[in-house]
Image: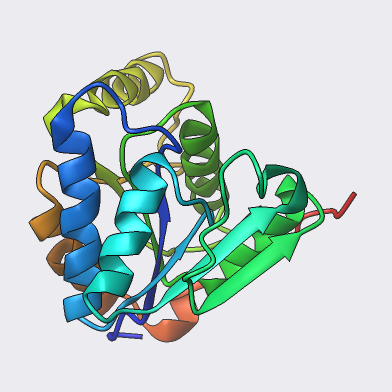
Amino acid sequence: MSVIRTICVYCGSGPGAHPAFIAAARDLGRILAENRVRLVYGGGSLGLMGALATAVLDHGGEVTGVIPEFLTAREKKLTRAQELIVTRNMHERKQIMFERADAFVALPGGIGTLEETIEQMTWAQLGRHKKPIVLANIEAFWDPLCALLDHMKELAFIRPGLPVEPIVVGRVEDILPRVRAAVARLGEAEIVEAAPTIQRM
């Protein structure tokens, strides 16, 4: 799978306090569209999520939004998306986003963004997939998480043989080249050894 067709992006439903966050989301949306990489994201029209998806669409790209029914009003689902999947719950949402993605990118965001990103790191650590995971470290947003991961390694809670190695980039322009390089080192069969199945509730 040397060609990346779809990237799942986790990001905030708010804009954050720094204008660089919204700018990064818009730039990433444009880059995905220009490279014909489909966006899979949380389906909302607010904050970084909305800026990202709108930029993809405005530049002629394709978007799949995946949003649980209880968030359709709160996060104002993006009806412009070519594909909008409304799920019964968060578990179903995350499963669909995983299945549709060739790689994952975490822009700045809140607890939900952190939880989704950490879950992908956990699955990768446990050998459930080898899809690239990128931390878009805009304005050093992810520095505290990177420091925590280093701390866990130092204290042997992240042990040899169970690495957690997200790709960390400071600019969105570097995301696709780094993802492509990571995928090129793996055969297609290695990317998903055994896709996780989430218990639906």
Residue 87 appears left or right of 19? right
Residue that appears at 31% across and 51% down: 51
Image coords of residue 75 (percent x, y): 56, 43
Instruction: Name the residue located 75 percent from the left edge and 44 percent from the top edge.
Output: 70
Lateral position of residue 127 relative to residue 28, left or right: right
**Quarter occupied by residue 83:** bottom right
Picture coordinates of residue 163, whole percent (x, y) = 40, 42
Q: Above or below — where is 197 with respect to 183? A: above
Task: Please tell me whether residue 84 is drawn above or below residue 148 in the rendered image.
Answer: below
- Left or right, 189 with respect to 50, comes to right
The answer to whether residue 190 of the structure is visible from this angle is: yes
Which residue ends up furthest to the right in the rendered image? 201
Task: Give coordinates of residue 134: x percent, y percent.
Answer: 30, 50
Residue 159 picture quarter: top left
Which residue corresponds to the image point at 60% horizontal and 70% vertical from the top-left? Answer: 84
Q: Position of residue 4 (x, y in %)?
A: 31, 79
Q: Nearer the viewer, residue 135 or 172?
A: 172
